[in-house]
Image (tube, helix red, strand yellow):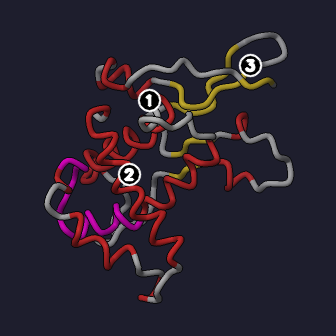
């Protein structure tokens, strides 16, 4: 199988059905047939065609959107449909229409950004915020939470910086999100 380039297009140009069917990962078979590995609507985005390192575990090449949340539910549960849509749209916008002045991130970078976003998603659910646009006026409340690791331990400054960079990137991408 060979890597197949993705057609870069803004999500804003697609209706809900079209967006859900968009490939986020694809490969080309030896016979030239295009194989879709993952679509926007999938609960797991698998980027193995774009991260060819055989020494990396398969789990490091994918994003699993079914993360556990602070209320005991999962992001993929129907009650979080809007937040899941917002999160997927944000992550995919970083690839399709990168931050102003930045190059298109690698799939590995997108996966890192996804994991850096998870504490924000958990905090948002706890606050009843189901779309990123609702963060306006609440982002400073997230700062102390960004410092917390598991079991209320404090994380390193670099982890805090990466978590807060997600909030900044959300602000910078706001016009590109649906």
Question: Which of the two discs, 2 and 1, sits closer to the camera?
Answer: 1
Instruction: Say which quarter of the image contains residue 86.
Output: top left
Judged left or right of residue 157, residue 147 is left
Q: Nearer the viewer, residue 35 or 95?
A: 95
Instruction: Say which quarter of the image contains residue 139.
Output: bottom left
Question: Which of the two discs, 1 and 3, sits closer to the camera?
Answer: 1
Could you classify mark 3 by the number of other residues whose Cα lies within 10 Å: few (under 14), some (14-19), or many (20 or more)?
Answer: some
The quarter of the picture where the N terminus appears is top right
Q: Vertically, is 4 above or below 79?
A: above
- Whole-angstrom CA distance, mark 2 to mark 3, is 29 Å
Q: Which mark is first along the chain, 3 or 1?
A: 3
Q: Which mark is first along the chain, 1 or 2?
A: 2
Q: Label 2: which residue?
A: 76
Question: Which of the two discs, 2 and 3, sits closer to the camera?
Answer: 3
Q: Label 1: which residue?
A: 97
- Whole-angstrom CA distance, mark 2 to mark 1, is 25 Å
Q: Vertically, is 111 above or below 106?
A: below
- Whole-angstrom CA distance, mark 1 to mark 3, is 24 Å
Q: Vertically, is 159 above or below 6?
A: below
Residue 21, disc: none
Residue 123 among those drawn in magenta: yes
* Image location of residue 107, percent across then percent down: 62, 41
Stretch of the chain drawn in magenta: 119-133
As drawn, which residue projects farthest toward the front? 101
Q: Label 3: which residue?
A: 28
Residue 111 among those drawn in magenta: no
The kind of secondary structure element at disc 1 is loop
The kind of secondary structure element at disc 2 is loop
Q: Vertically, is 94 above or below 128?
A: above
Could you classify mark 1 by the number of other residues whose Cα lies within 10 Å: few (under 14), some (14-19), or many (20 or more)?
Answer: some
The residue shown at (48%, 29%) is 96
Q: Tell me which secondary structure the magenta stretch mostly adopts.
A: helix
């Amino acid at each position: 199988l060979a890597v197949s380039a993705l057609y870069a297009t803004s999500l804003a140009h697609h209706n809900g059905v079209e967006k859900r069917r968009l490939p986020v990962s694809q490969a080309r078979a030896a016979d030239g047939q295009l194989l879709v590995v993952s679509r926007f609507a999938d609960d797991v985005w698998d980027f193995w065609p774009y991260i060819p390192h055989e020494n990396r575990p398969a789990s490091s090449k994918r994003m699993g959107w079914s993360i556990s949340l602070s209320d005991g539910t999962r992001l993929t549960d129907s009650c979080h449909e809007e937040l899941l849509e917002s999160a997927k749209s944000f992550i995919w916008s970083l690839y399709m229409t990168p931050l102003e002045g930045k190059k298109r991130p690698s799939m590995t970078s997108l996966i890192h950004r996804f994991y850096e976003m998870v504490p924000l998603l958990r905090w948002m659910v706890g606050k009843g915020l189901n779309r990123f646009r609702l963060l306006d006026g609440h982002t400073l409340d997230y700062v102390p939470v960004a410092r917390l690791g598991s079991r209320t331990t404090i994380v390193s400054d670099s982890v805090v910086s990466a978590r807060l960079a997600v909030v900044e990137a959300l602000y910078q991408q706001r016009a590109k999100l649906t």
